[in-house]
Image (cartoon, rainbow, N blue to C red):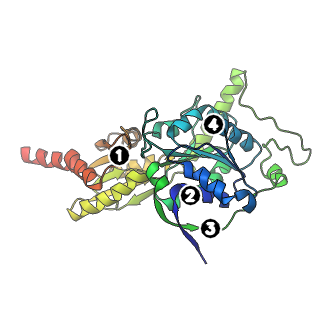
């Protein structure tokens, strides 16, 4: 019998990491993601699986606890919201420099500064471009439903250990707080220390035969060696770009206009498409599921089909830069966004599409 529950997005990913065999969660409360820590505390995963849940004294402490756990080859994670993720950037860069796998959750709120506790997508640059120091990238998964919040816990750990990379689930306050039906799968068993030593010989637990400890560090004062490390990382990122792109297309087959949106904005665009189709406007949606690696090739392909692309974001226009790079001048690309924690309405998104593309085209034809 299927285990189906009504859950918040934050609760779903918390249950998801338990069932994905997570060894440890280290975090600090901040709205709108505090339910992650609360759910884990209330459900006592240490009794279910042996998973450790610890409220650290700060976000900085949290990410460095993740650093220590990841170095041991353990499945570890933290979660926060925008200002808290900013505090974690140094630790994330350390994780990147040592190629330690982990899962990070950012339930984005409006900013800059303390901003608002309402949902936003204004952390795109921080997540996708690498908010910390150095040349690094993370795999970034963008859920658009509570079910995906749950699913991306398991997927995130799988990708993290497959590529020895940090995986960020870039959610927002709406997805984190909304309640939807979630289908839960079976518990994944946690690995023993002996299994980790065999499966992940890079971990500090030691080599499986000699038990000699590994030393993990991102420090190398020799610039030649440091360049080789960076070249290796860049090669890995290029491999990920070729193998891990994920996206969803919605009514793109005959589309003459295209929305590009992720997360909550994509849900808004799906309704805007229904409204547009009812008016005879052939519009579709390309929803990036991975923000890195980005579905550049698919957007490039669709740009040869459509008359215009509208990037819909809950920000001042961060993702639109990547949409324009993908389109490469083949078609006009415009941006529409709401700021400060406001979610755009489907009818206003459709109105913007009409104003920026259809009205212009009609005006041009009448002028001729």
User: Which numbered circle lies on residue 185?
Assistant: 3
Q: Residues within 10 Å of mark 1 (few under 14, many from 20)?
A: some
Please name which of the two marks, 4 or 1, marks the residue nearer to the observer. Answer: 4
What is the residue that sits farthest to the bottom in this orientation?
Answer: 1
Residue pictured at 58% horizontal, 41% vertical: 237
Indicate which disc, 2 or 4, sits on the residue closer to the N terminus. Answer: 2
Q: Position of residue 90 (x, y in %)?
A: 62, 31
Q: Residues within 10 Å of mark 4 (few under 14, many from 20)?
A: some
Residue pictured at 74% horizontal, 39% vertical: 68
**Is 228 displayed left or right of 176 in the figure?**
right
Q: Position of residue 140 (x, y in %)?
A: 54, 46
Q: Nearer the viewer, residue 247 or 38?
A: 38
Q: Residues within 10 Å of mark 3 (few under 14, many from 20)?
A: some
Indicate which disc, 3 or 4, sits on the residue closer to the N terminus. Answer: 4
Q: Which residue is mark 1?
A: 342
- Give the alpha-carbon distance from disc 2 to disc 4, as whole Å: 21 Å
């Amino acid at each position: 019998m299927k285990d189906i529950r009504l859950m918040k997005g934050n609760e779903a990913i918390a249950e998801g990491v338990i069932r994905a065999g997570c060894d440890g969660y280290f975090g600090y409360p901040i709205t709108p993601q505090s339910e992650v820590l609360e759910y884990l505390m209330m459900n006592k995963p240490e009794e279910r699986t042996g998973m450790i849940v610890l409220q650290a004294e700060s976000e900085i402490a949290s990410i460095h606890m993740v650093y220590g756990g990841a170095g041991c080859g353990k499945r570890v994670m933290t979660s926060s919201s925008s200002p808290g993720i900013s505090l974690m950037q140094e630790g994330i860069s350390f994780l990147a420099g040592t190629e330690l796998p982990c899962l990070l959750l950012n339930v984005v709120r409006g900013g800059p500064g303390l901003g608002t506790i309402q949902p936003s997508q204004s952390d795109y640059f921080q997540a996708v471009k690498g908010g910390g120091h150095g040349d690094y990238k993370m795999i970034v998964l963008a859920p658009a439903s509570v079910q995906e919040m749950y699913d991306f816990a398991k997927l995130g750990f799988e990708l993290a250990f497959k590529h020895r990379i940090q995986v960020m689930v870039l959610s927002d306050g709406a997805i984190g707080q909304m309640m939807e039906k979630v289908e839960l799968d079976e518990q994944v068993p946690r690995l023993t220390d002996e299994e980790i030593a065999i499966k992940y010989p890079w971990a500090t637990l030691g080599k499986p035969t000699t038990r000699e400890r590994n030393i993990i560090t991102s420090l190398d004062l020799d610039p030649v060696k440091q360049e080789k490390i960076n070249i290796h990382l860049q090669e890995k990122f290029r491999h990920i770009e070729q193998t891990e792109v994920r996206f969803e297309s919605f009514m793109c087959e005959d589309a003459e206009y295209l929305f590009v949106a992720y997360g909550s904005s994509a849900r808004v665009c799906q309704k805007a498409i229904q409204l547009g189709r009812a008016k005879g406007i052939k519009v579709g949606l390309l929803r990036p599921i991975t923000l890195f690696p980005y579905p550049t090739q698919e957007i490039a392909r669709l740009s040869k089909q459509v008359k215009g692309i509208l990037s819909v974001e809950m920000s001042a226009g961060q993702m639109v830069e990547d949409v324009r790079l993908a389109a490469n001048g083949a078609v006009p690309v415009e941006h529409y966004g709401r700021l400060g924690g406001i979610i755009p309405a489907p009818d206003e998104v459709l109105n913007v599409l009409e104003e920026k593309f259809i009205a212009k085209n009609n005006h041009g034809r009448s002028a001729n």
